[in-house]
């Protein structure tokens, strides 16, 4: 065997301590842990053994050389001075992976090009030939790293990344990388000595169970790999590699003959189970597995005791949060009911998700699933697990039940299918909950600065849990938004597109609402009675709706028999939505116009002979849209806005003026100075489902002074 050389084994962030232990167990010496890997020393036989058996490393790199770098061309000089002819054939296809930074290196591709140029220069000098570059099928992979002016270059003995074991030809949704799955199994106590059952209740394509079985049955991860980075290395020792292969084959066959440990995989998706079964067959371990379609929140434990190791959904995409939260809650209940005396190990995307299990963990590890921070939590179900709950938990549940019983009956009598169920009734549960047919839209208000984010999130999720437990709404029909102070057009900007839409009833009108894609759903529920009041006065009248949004007030006016309705808004998106609302209500007359314009500028541009009997004016509290000439502040600018609107008002006409500014103060003197008077109708305009929130909006009827 050759004398020991220096190596570096790379790994995913978070796996370094486990890799350190593994390298020592496999015979590496002078092992040193660093970020994203470990350096070590080994002879060739030991290096081959590590390539074959490592479950955690992504690559095994043989250190070839180092050199100080001052400028870019120093890389070419240093690399070209290295005896590459001792390691690779001149006609070999190669690829260079480069990482690191330096003032002289513009980007990693430039660094890789410099290294490649150095190799090519060397072979032109010593052999009169040059290697080719192959990105898809290289014979030799060179890795170069530049850090603190030191360039280090390696020969990659792995070839393809070592996480590619060869058994996973088809992937499931959001699959775990095999190296991470192996790390989770090891942290969960899986070893070659594990003699209890292992179950995964969210098994997907089976990676966690398959890696666990490979550990238990001592199947080397590299056993069936047919291509390695060292195959075209000129110093490759085939006899040493053959010895490692034979040794791994013998260990695996002996374990299969002697062991009976069984693995149970459950998933709701039959297609994923079929993939998992194929994977187990490729590992030659099919007999060690039972695959069964089942819901993790309902499945019963196998007859034998053992270890649960699972990676439930994280709910990281918009629209999945609530389903995921409630999934964890039901999953925890099922574990408590059916998996007593088992060990439970859960990889979660968020510690607050783990809290929904209502179980106490004895150990947690921080890991990384790609770019996502994740937590592996270990639970000992052989010990008593008293369910921990908050003493105040019944308060929110009781309030929700009380509100629903009262308001659901009122809404049915009122003739509306969308209404506010809850609006921060209990201060610690700082959210609003709106009903839209059989959907719930939950809007979390931004927490005060003195409330830690983790506390606020835990309270929110307790509210959601209570909603699901106390009321007849399905988890997949609940959506969550975060409300906070908006500036400019943020209040109208589109969020992540999921397109949860439904058609709601409001008295005689129907409206399309979108519960996911925008900050607001398309219908301001607190203005319900304001719109109804407008409709009462619209028959035979000409109506102007400014800042029309999705034109709900226009629809009510048109349905009530208005002879003319003009809707003006800056947003084409919302006017198109308004057109759909008109179509829903079979309103298609030419007298129903929609105009895209800056409402303030549009008012200035209208000729004085233009007249309207009713003007509905519901401006934003503040706006600084780039498409507006100036910013708008309703407190500062309302007198000027009403003055412009009054220019278009008939002598007996009325402006229905509303806004949502908290602590708004009407400038009565300013209005009087321009010949206007306002009647405060706010109190009478707030419906029962908003009765707790007296400041939800302001509403005035503005007329000319007699």
Image (cartoon, rainbow, N blue to C red):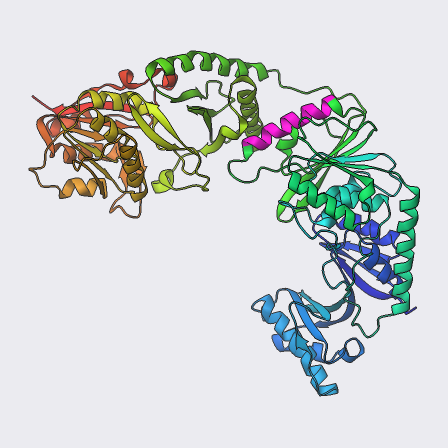
Q: Is residue 380 magenta?
A: no
User: Left or right: 684 with respect to 211?
Assistant: left
Which residue corresponds to the image point at 74% horizontal and 44% vertical from the top-left?
277
> Which quadrant of the figure has residue 456?
top right
Q: Residue 501: x, y in percent?
A: 41, 34
Query: Which residue: 69% across, 40% down?
Result: 273
**Residue shown at 89%/64% (left/top)?**
242
Q: Residue 310: image x %, image y %?
A: 71, 36
Q: Is residue 161 above or below residue 602?
A: below
Task: Give 46 or 508, whichever is nearer the viewer.
Answer: 508
Q: In this orientation, which residue lies closer to the viewer: 457 or 124?
A: 124
Relative to residue 7, is residue 604 drawn left or right?
left
Q: Is residue 49 left or right of residue 475?
A: right
Question: What secondary structure characterizes most of the magenta part?
Answer: helix
Say which quadrant the C terminus sits in.
top left
- Could you tell me if residue 447 is visible in this image? no
Q: Position of residue 671 (x, y in %)?
A: 16, 28
- Where is residue 368 shown, x and y percent of the image? 67, 46
Q: Is residue 329 magenta?
A: yes
Taking 449 as reference, is 706 above or below it?
Answer: above
Q: Which residues are magenta?
A: 322-337
Nearer to us in this view, 277 or 2? 277
Residue 383 shows in this picture: yes
On screen, 541 above or below 126? above
Quarter of the image containing the N terminus? bottom right
């Amino acid at each position: 065997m050759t004398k020991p050389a220096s190596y570096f084994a790379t790994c995913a962030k978070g796996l370094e301590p486990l890799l350190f232990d593994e390298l020592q167990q496999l015979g590496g010496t002078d092992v040193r842990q660093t970020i994203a890997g470990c350096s070590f020393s080994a002879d060739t036989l030991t290096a081959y053994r590590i390539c074959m058996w490592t479950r955690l490393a992504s690559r095994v790199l043989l250190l070839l050389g180092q050199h100080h770098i001052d400028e870019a061309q120093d890389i070419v000089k240093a690399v070209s001075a290295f005896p590459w002819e001792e390691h690779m054939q001149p006609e070999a296809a190669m690829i260079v992976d480069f990482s690191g930074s330096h003032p002289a290196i513009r980007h990693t591709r430039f660094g890789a090009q410099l290294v490649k140029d150095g190799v090519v220069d060397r072979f032109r000098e010593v052999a009169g030939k040059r290697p080719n570059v192959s990105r898809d099928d290289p014979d030799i992979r060179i890795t170069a790293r530049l850090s603190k002016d030191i360039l280090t270059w390696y020969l990659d003995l792995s070839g393809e990344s070592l996480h590619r074991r060869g058994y996973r030809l088809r992937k499931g949704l959001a699959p775990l990388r095999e190296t991470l799955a192996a790390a989770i199994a090891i942290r969960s106590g899986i070893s070659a000595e594990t003699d209890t059952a292992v179950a995964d209740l969210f098994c997907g394509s089976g990676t966690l169970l398959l890696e666990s079985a490979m550990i238990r049955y001592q199947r080397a991860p590299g056993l069936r790999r047919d291509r390695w980075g060292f195959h075209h290395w000129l110093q490759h020792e085939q006899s040493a590699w053959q010895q490692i292969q034979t040794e791994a084959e013998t260990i695996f066959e002996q374990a299969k003959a002697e062991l009976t440990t069984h693995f149970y995989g459950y998933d709701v998706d039959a297609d994923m189970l079929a993939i998992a079964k194929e994977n187990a067959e490729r590992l030659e371990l099919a007999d060690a597995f039972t695959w069964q379609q089942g819901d993790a929140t309902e499945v019963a434990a196998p007859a034998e005791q053992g270890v649960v190791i699972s990676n439930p959904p994280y709910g990281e995409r918009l629209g999945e949060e609530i389903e995921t939260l409630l999934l964890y809650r039901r999953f925890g209940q099922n574990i408590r009911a059916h998996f007593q005396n088992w060990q439970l190990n859960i990889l979660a995307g968020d510690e607050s998700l783990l809290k929904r299990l209502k179980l106490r963990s004895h150990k947690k590890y921080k890991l990384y699933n790609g770019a996502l921070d994740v937590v592996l939590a270990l639970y000992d179900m052989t010990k008593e697990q008293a369910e921990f709950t908050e003493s105040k938990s019944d308060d929110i549940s009781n309030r929700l039940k009380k509100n629903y019983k009262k308001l659901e009956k009122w809404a049915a009598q009122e003739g509306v299918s969308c209404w506010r169920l809850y609006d921060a009734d209990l201060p610690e549960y700082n959210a609003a909950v709106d009903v839209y047919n059989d959907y719930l839209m939950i809007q979390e208000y931004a927490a005060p600065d003195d409330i830690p984010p983790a506390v606020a999130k835990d309270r929110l999720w307790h509210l959601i849990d209570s909603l699901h437990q106390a009321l007849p709404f399905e988890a997949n029909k609940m959506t969550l938004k975060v409300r906070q102070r908006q500036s400019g057009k943020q209040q109208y900007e589109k969020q992540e597109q999921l397109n949860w839409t439904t058609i709601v009833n409001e008295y005689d009108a129907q409206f399309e609402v979108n519960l996911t894609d925008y900050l607001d759903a398309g219908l301001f529920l607190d203005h319900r009675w304001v719109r109804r009041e407008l409709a009462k006065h619209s028959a035979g009248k000409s109506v102007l709706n400014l800042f029309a949004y999705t034109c709900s007030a226009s629809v009510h006016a048109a349905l009530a028999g208005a002879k003319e309705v003009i809707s003006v808004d800056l947003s084409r998106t919302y006017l198109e939505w308004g057109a759909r609302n008109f179509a829903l209500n079979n309103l298609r007359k030419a007298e129903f116009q929609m105009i895209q314009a800056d409402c303030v500028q549009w008012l200035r541009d209208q000729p004085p002979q233009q007249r309207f009997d009713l003007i509905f004016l519901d401006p934003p509290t503040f706006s600084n849209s780039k498409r507006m000439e100036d910013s708008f502040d309703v407190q500062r600018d309302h007198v000027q806005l009403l003055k412009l609107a009054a220019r278009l008002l008939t002598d007996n006409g009325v402006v229905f003026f509303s806004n949502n500014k908290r602590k708004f103060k009407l400038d009565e003197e300013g209005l009087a100075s321009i010949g206007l008077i306002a009647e405060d109708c706010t109190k009478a305009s707030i419906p029962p489902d908003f009765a707790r929130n007296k400041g939800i909006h302001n509403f005035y009827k503005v007329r000319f002074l007699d």
